[in-house]
Image (cartoon, helix red, strand yellow):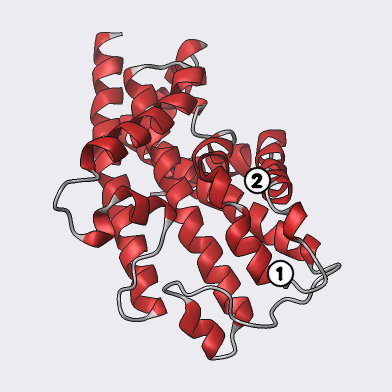
């Protein structure tokens, strides 16, 4: 357990205390700004701007920029033959499990921090909240007079999609250990699955557009968040199992 925790802390330091993480967070903030600066006005509030600013650049905010800090590290280490250094000291299971957790966490945090930084930037000119302009699953928080909680929960909901993309990038990189493939393949996979499954009779909360981009109203804000979190955890766990198996295979046949 001590070895696992130590490896996790090292991974977090490599992912979060890095130039790549800063670039990722600033990139998310910049994309949000470029997609919404035309609608910023004295009549706007921060929530109304933030909630619609990323709608046209979903893939950049959730599926590309959050992969930069850590999701490609396995591909980089395999290409430079640095994996043996870590595997000898930690074992395949500890190494792979930590890659999954740190990739998902850093992907989540990059998007979450970028959204909050943009909101703080907008507070220089705009009030946080003036009137309800959105009617998603978390609107009851605004009706209850909790705009800060609404911002945090909505940002976390979208950022969980980044955790899925980051885990998918790691999973794909164990089959094709190439940094460019690790970043681009999850986006290609997402659009392919979106086209294939859009007419399937799936539960509404499992539709890709809802799972990744939207919110499914599960009855309350708390239930909606737990449903999204549970779905993401299950999918990341399934991919994590595949990651452990594939890394073990690679090590055995290397």
**Residue 213 place in picture, x, y as percent:** 43, 53
Q: Are there few (<14), some (14-19), or many (20+) residues within 10 Å of tag 1?
A: many
**Residue 58 place in picture, x, y as percent:** 52, 45
Of discs 2 and 1, which sits in the foreground? 1
Q: Are there few (<14), some (14-19), or many (20+) residues within 10 Å of tag 2?
A: many
Q: CA distance from mark 2 to mark 1?
A: 16 Å
- Regarding residue 5, the answer to whether it shows in the image is yes
Q: Quadrant of the C terminus?
A: top left
| Left or right of 151 on screen, residue 81 | left
First-in-chain label (2 vs 1): 2
Q: Give me the residue at 30% from left, 61% from top.
A: 230
Question: Which of the 4 quarters of the picture holds residue 27?
Answer: top right
* SS state under label 1: helix
**Residue 76 place in picture, x, y as percent:** 52, 19
| Left or right of 77 on screen, residue 218 | left
Q: Which mark is residue 28?
A: 2
Q: Give me the residue at 59% from left, 39% from top.
A: 15
Q: Give me the residue at 28% from left, 36% from top.
A: 195
Question: Which of the 4 quarters of the picture holds residue 175?
Answer: top left
Up the image or down, 153 lies above or below 55; here it is below
| Left or right of 163 on screen, residue 35 | right
**Residue 29 place in picture, x, y as percent:** 70, 49
Q: Which mark is residue 183?
A: none
Taking the view exactly as shown, the residue that stands out farthest to the right is 124
Taking the view exactly as shown, the residue that stands out farthest to the bottom is 144
Up the image or down, 232 lies above or below 223; here it is above
Q: Nearer the viewer, residue 76 or 231?
A: 231
Q: Which residue is mark 1?
A: 46
């Amino acid at each position: 357990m001590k070895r696992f925790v130590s490896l996790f802390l090292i991974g977090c330091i490599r992912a979060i205390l890095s130039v790549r993480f800063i670039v990722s967070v600033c990139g998310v903030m910049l994309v949000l700004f470029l997609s919404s600066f035309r609608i910023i006005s004295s009549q706007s509030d921060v929530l109304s701007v933030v909630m619609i600013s990323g709608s046209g650049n979903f893939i950049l905010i959730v599926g590309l920029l959050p992969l930069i800090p850590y999701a490609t590290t396995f591909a980089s280490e395999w290409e430079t033959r640095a994996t043996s250094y870590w595997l000898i000291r930690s074992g395949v299971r500890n190494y792979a499990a930590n890659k999954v957790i740190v990739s998902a966490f850093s992907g989540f945090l990059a998007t979450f921090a970028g959204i909050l930084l943009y909101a703080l930037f907008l507070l220089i000119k705009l009030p946080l909240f003036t009137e309800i302009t959105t009617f998603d699953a978390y609107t009851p928080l605004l009706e209850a007079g909790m705009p800060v909680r609404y911002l945090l929960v909505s940002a976390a909901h979208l950022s969980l999609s980044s955790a899925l993309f980051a885990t998918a990038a790691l999973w794909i990189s164990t089959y094709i250990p190439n940094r460019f493939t690790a970043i681009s393949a999850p986006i290609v996979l997402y659009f392919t699955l979106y086209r294939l499954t859009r007419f399937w009779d799936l539960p509404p909360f499992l539709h890709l557009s809802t799972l990744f981009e939207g919110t499914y109203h599960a009855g309350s804000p708390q239930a909606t968040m737990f449903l999204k979190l549970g779905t993401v955890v299950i999918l990341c766990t399934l991919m994590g199992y595949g990651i452990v198996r594939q890394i073990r295979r690679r090590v055995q046949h290397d």
